[in-house]
Amino acid sequence: MKVLSKLISATCLSVSLCGGVQANLIDNGGFENVGTSSPLGNYGSASTWQIYSSIPEWDASQNVEIWSNDFIVDAYEGNNVLELNAHPGDPNGQFSIFQDFETVVGQEYQLTFAGRKRQQNSDESFSVSVGDLTDTIINQAFGSWNEYSYSFVAVDVLSTLTFTSKDGGSDTTGNIFDAVNITSVPEPGTLALMLLGLSSLVYSRKQTAK
């Protein structure tokens, strides 16, 4: 009976892990790695904020700012955050960051990230897109992190996650992000098969014990 209980516990743990702990498909989602590239200009410092043309794993249409050590706002996790609206190379362009990652066509995925406004009275807005998902957020709440969660379905074997500021290239402040995470959603059939296997095991043990 003790052996059976251990088997049930182990299987339940496996089901829980399969349903709740998945690998993040986004690299450097917390913006902790700024790489070896030199920051642009003589702005800020390594202990506060600096401007980069891009950072590891992410591409950018304009420059981005990385804030460190709770500069202006506390990080949602880790030490760094990214401010999308930075000092532009093209004031007529848009601020965007994007990252490609491998996906399975038709598979469902979950996107989560933290975002916040920089200034209380500013009009800060952005769009997020990936797979079959597109959404625009206008005027995030100020003073705390907003936690965003989306489900989307992959439409190609290579998906692109994109954040784009809707404020225009001349607006150099706002749209702060942290903790970007994408995980695959287990198919119900996978969990059902595990539970079916457990039921069969329990039934077999009972028949043997008779």
Image (cartoon, rainbow, N blue to C red):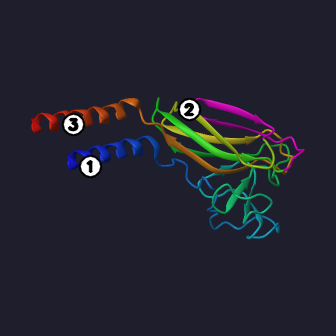
Per the image, label 1 sits on a secondary structure element best described as: helix
Residue 151's image quarter? top right
Three-letter amino acid code of the residue under disc 2: Phe
- Residue at 22 percent of width and 49 percent of height: 2
Residue numbers of the magenta segment: 119-140
The numbered mark, 2 or 1, whose residue comes first in the sequence reads 1
- Does residue 133 belong to the magenta stretch? yes
- Does residue 87 belong to the magenta stretch? no
Picture quarter with the C terminus: top left
- The residue under label 1 is 6
Q: Position of residue 29 (x, y in %)?
A: 60, 52
Three-letter amino acid code of the residue under disc 1: Lys
The numbered mark, 3 or 2, whose residue comes first in the sequence reads 2
- The residue under label 2 is 152
Residue 102 located left or right of residue 75: left
- Few, some or many residues within 10 Å of mark 2 (<14, 14–19, 20+): many
Per the image, label 2 sits on a secondary structure element best described as: strand
- The residue under label 3 is 202
Q: Nearer the viewer, mark 3 or mark 2?
A: 3
Vertical comparison of 125 with 192: above or below: below
- Residue at 82 percent of width and 51 percent of height: 118
Three-letter amino acid code of the residue under disc 3: Val
Residue 55's image quarter? bottom right
Per the image, label 3 sits on a secondary structure element best described as: helix
